[in-house]
Amino acid sequence: GRLPAGLEGPRAPSSEESRSTTGGMARWPGSLVRPLRSGLSIARGSIGGSSGGGGGDSGGGDSDSGSGDAPVALVLTHALGFSKECWAPVLEDLAPLLTRRVEWVALDFSGHGASTSSPPTGRWDEYHVAEAREVLQSELRAVAPASRTVGVGHSMGGAVLAALELRQPGSLARVAAIEPPIFPAAVGRLARLLTSAGLNPLANAAAQRRRAWPSAAAAREHFGSRMAAGWDSRSLDAFLGGALRDAPGGGVELCCDPATEARCLGLPLVASEVAAGYDGGAAVTLVTCSASRFSPLLLPGSGPAAYSLVAQTLRAGVVRLPGASHHLVVQEQPALVARLVADEVAAIV
């Protein structure tokens, strides 16, 4: 459950300090986390370069002498059902790769993690795009201009950042969207039709997902032997610490209501709609895993082919992440994702 050294202030917490007292659930140090007026929860810190280990509001991004030394701002957005804590292992592996200071912020979308704002009941992309825009304006604009701001998002989080940049080009200098749920028109509209008929298998499965466990230890056993069996051990700690909360009647429960997850899965994004009105100029890259099944065909290796089609509609780049075979690459291979983030930061001149 370790977090990036120095992000929490003058002394990095021990592995025991970074865990809760029940079930070994890793949590962000409190000095990193705060709520926004809207009810969103964020974590914010500084790594690399001359950051000196300080977390929180460092501000004053123009104090460095030359553009090569000026800080880069980084916004990190999580997948459906996850939380900002999922980025802790990635940030830990990212720190030694950086040659310049990076001021980062990770947010919990509404209905996730520690955010208290109500989850979306309609178009989740529009709702969450507005939330990402709020965080950019309130947390990072004083640190670095849009021309020095990078966005990296996983799955739903990647779709949100891509949609933000396509709808308002220039919001971010670069966007790396890791396997976002943006599909060709025919497939996306078919999925919506199935949803309206109550026949969407992904949405129906999410609606039936177990939400509560009698203890944190029981939740750890449940996820550790199922979904998280192939994860980096730090990622399981991060998931348990951010995506679970104490249940009102005792035990723990998922922060993201399965009904919210089902609504989002039932409304996949259509590439032509995301790009509607877009006239070029956005620096968006779709990142796909080499043998991913995350595609309409659900076959190994079909993900890269599907994203090549989507990229044409979005006029985006597409990159196949070498050595990554699964949609949950952030959880399984955080070091590989850290290298991706480092390359995106290095591209800012």
Image (cartoon, rainbow, N blue to C red):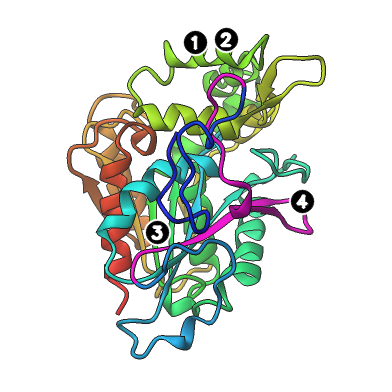
**Badge 3, how many Cα within 10 Å: few under 14, some, many 20+?**
many
Q: Residues within 10 Å of mark 2 (few under 14, many from 20)?
A: some
Q: Which residue is mark 3?
A: 314
Residue under the image location 32 percent in, 74 percent down: 348
**Secondary element type, mark 2:** helix
The stretch in magenta equals: 22-49
Q: Are marks 1 and 2 in contact (CB under 8 Å)?
A: yes
Asked whether the viewer can see residue 329, the reply is yes
Q: Is residue 35 left or right of residue 97?
A: right
Is residue 178 something one can see in this rendering? Answer: no
Task: Give the x, y percent position of residue 26.
Answer: 52, 33
Q: In the image, which disc is placed on residue 105?
A: none
Marks 1 and 2, Cα distance to the nearest angstrom? 5 Å
Residue beneath disc 4: 39
Disc number lying in front (4 or 2): 2
Q: Does 113 lie within the magenta span?
A: no
* Residue contact at pointers 4 and 2, CB within 8 angstroms: no
Q: CA distance from mark 4 to mark 3?
A: 32 Å
Q: Reading the chain from its start, which is encountered first: label 4 or label 2?
A: 4
Q: Secondary structure at mark 4?
A: loop
Residue at which label 1 appears: 221
In the displayed structure image, the side of residue 38 where residue 209 appears, left or right:
left
Nearer mark to the viewer, of 4 and 3: 4
Q: In which quadrant will I find the C terminus?
A: bottom left
Coordinates of residue 61 in the picture (x, y in percent): 49, 81
Q: CA distance from mark 1 to mark 4?
A: 31 Å
Which type of secondary structure does the marked residue at label 3 adopt? helix
State the residue in front, 347 or 180. 347
Q: Disc 3 residue type?
A: Leu
Q: Which residue is mark 2?
A: 218
Disc 3 vs disc 2: which is toward the camera?
Answer: 2
Disc 4 marks a residue whose amino acid type is Gly
